[in-house]
Image: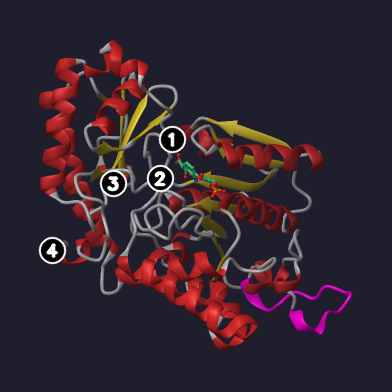
């Protein structure tokens, strides 16, 4: 598949080799125009925009737009809130559906926010949070497991769990499976329905390019959500929000996981950003990303062997970014960024680079490799003047 046409849909700064789309995707031109349109609607329609411009329906409309990218039915996804809030909502919902059980199982590759949230919920409810090694998840499940909560693609190493197998295993022991897709959505082909995920959450500012602070999504398997009373029962998750009833009655379906006023300007940008996926196959996007990844792996091995691949070698076992380990990874990443190669550093020793074929091609990888080879050969990060000038790397 030729992605040169999709590259033109992005407004990338000149001179930058952007391998950081796993942290913050670049700006699709359609996101900028959709956000500008929403500003105009606000200016012209004032409060009438909620209905006149469709603002009130954005959480559900955006859910339907994301659903095909994650292999879910359109009416099973809702957008809004931050991912951390979505993790909390989904975990509370899943636990409520298994009230007799005492354990949450997760792994040490999970993102800190997810682990903090699960630990605090466990503390308040008198449950046990078991944080096991990624390859010990399956054996950790048992008759007391209420929820298996995992991030499918490890934010550091890109190691990818087998969602279908682990969800099936969770179901075998009577538990529910909750998947965080922050590093999966827009990166790897997903079939939530086929994989038996009960709940899934994810963010839209990484591979979906919705912009900084773009809201998160939540998916619940069909049939499951009707039994859920949201732990955060906000007025916009009510069946009749403008009835202003004193008693909560959940909206039908996943719309009950709405909480409060949607961030319309962010959602407009996201709505524009999602148009770049029209006609694309996630399978082809992923296959192309893996081709770029192999080019980067081979080039680093040949020209900068001090950077050790810390991601799985098998493309089927990883997401769409690569991690390379080096004890001085933070300073090295600063030196890359100073030369126009933007990736990120993750403590303690990871250089993280994302392969995003919608706007990155083989020539970008070759340019990245030239920068990587030059920095690693010259040890440019050790230059005292450069070290003194350094700021933080996110
Ligand atoms: C896997 C994962 N889960 C949760 C989060 C938290 O997302 P947010 O900061 O949008 O709440 C992130 C990233 O920040 C993440 O990578
Ligand atoms: N959400 C972020 C932010 O607001 C600032 C800087 C980074 C982020 C991130 O998304 C971090 C990301 N979840 C990660 O995988 O490292």
Q: Is residue 340 left or right of residue 71?
A: left
Closer to the N terminus: mark 4 or mark 2? 4
Measure the C-alpha gap from mark 1 to mark 3: 28 Å
Task: Report crowding for label 4: few under 14, some 14 to 19, many 20 or more residues within 10 A (C-alpha).
Answer: few
Q: Is residue 82 above or below residue 32?
A: above
Closer to the N terminus: mark 1 or mark 4? 4
- What quarter of the picture does the C terminus occupy? top left
User: Mark 4 or mark 2, which is nearer to you?
Assistant: 2
What residue would you read off at disc 2?
23
What residue would you read off at disc 1?
394
Determine the main secondary structure of the stretch shown in magenta. Answer: loop
Q: Is residue 197 left or right of residue 360?
A: right
Give the residue at x 44% y 55%.
205
Measure the C-alpha gap from mark 3 to mark 2: 21 Å
Q: Are marks 2 and 1 in contact (CB under 8 Å)?
A: yes
Closer to the N terminus: mark 2 or mark 1? 2
Measure the C-alpha gap from mark 4 to mark 2: 24 Å
Q: Is residue 240 part of the magenta span, yes or no?
A: yes
Determine whether the beta carbon of the residue marked 2 sits less than 8 angstroms from the nearest atom of ligand 2: yes
Give the residue at x 32% y 27%.
334
Closer to the N terminus: mark 3 or mark 4? 4
Q: Secondary structure at mark 4?
A: loop
Q: Are marks 1 and 4 in contact (CB under 8 Å)?
A: no
Q: Secondary structure at mark 2?
A: loop
Q: Are marks 4 and 2 in contact (CB under 8 Å)?
A: no
Choose top left, top right, bottom left or bottom right for residue 36.
bottom left
Q: Is residue 315 above or below residue 82?
A: above
- What quarter of the picture does the N terminus occupy? bottom left
What residue would you read off at disc 3?
316
């Amino acid at each position: 598949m030729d992605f040169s046409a999709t590259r033109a849909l992005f407004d990338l700064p000149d001179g930058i080799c952007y391998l950081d789309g796993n942290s913050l995707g670049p700006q699709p031109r359609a996101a900028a125009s959709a956000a500008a349109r929403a500003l105009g609607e606000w200016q012209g329609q004032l409060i009438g925009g909620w209905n006149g411009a469709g603002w009130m329906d954005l959480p559900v409309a955006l859910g339907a737009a994301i659903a095909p990218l994650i292999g879910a039915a359109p009416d099973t996804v809702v957008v809004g809130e931050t991912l951390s809030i979505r993790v909390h909502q989904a975990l509370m919902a899943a636990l409520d559906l298994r009230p007799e059980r005492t354990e949450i199982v997760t792994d040490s590759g999970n993102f800190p926010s997810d682990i903090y949230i699960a630990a605090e919920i466990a503390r308040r409810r008198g449950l046990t949070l078991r944080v096991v090694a990624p390859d010990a998840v399956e054996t950790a499940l048992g008759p007391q497991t209420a929820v298996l909560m995992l991030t499918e693609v490890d934010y550091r190493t890109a190691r990818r769990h087998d969602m279908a197998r682990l969800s099936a295993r969770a179901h075998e022991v009577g538990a529910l499976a909750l998947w965080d897709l922050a590093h999966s959505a827009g990166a790897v082909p997903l079939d939530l329905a086929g994989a038996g995920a009960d709940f899934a959450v994810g963010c839209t500012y990484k591979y979906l390019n919705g912009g900084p602070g773009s809201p998160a999504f939540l998916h619940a398997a069909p049939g499951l959500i009707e039994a859920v009373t949201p732990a955060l029962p906000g007025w916009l998750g009510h069946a009749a929000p403008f009835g202003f009833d004193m008693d909560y009655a959940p909206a039908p379906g996943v719309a009950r996981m709405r909480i409060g006023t949607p961030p319309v300007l962010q959602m407009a940008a996201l709505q524009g950003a999602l148009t770049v996926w029209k006609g694309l196959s996630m399978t082809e996007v992923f296959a192309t990303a893996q081709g770029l990844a192999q080019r980067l792996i081979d080039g680093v091995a040949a020209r900068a062997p001090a950077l050790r691949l810390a991601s799985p070698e098998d493309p089927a076992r990883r997401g769409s970014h690569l991690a390379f380990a080096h004890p001085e990874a933070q300073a090295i990443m600063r030196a890359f960024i100073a030369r126009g190669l933007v990736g990120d550093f993750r403590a303690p020793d990871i250089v993280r680079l994302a392969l995003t074929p919608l706007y990155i091609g083989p020539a970008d990888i070759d340019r990245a490799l030239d920068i990587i080879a030059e920095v690693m050969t010259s040890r440019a990060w050790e230059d005292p003047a450069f070290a003194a000038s350094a700021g933080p790397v996110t």
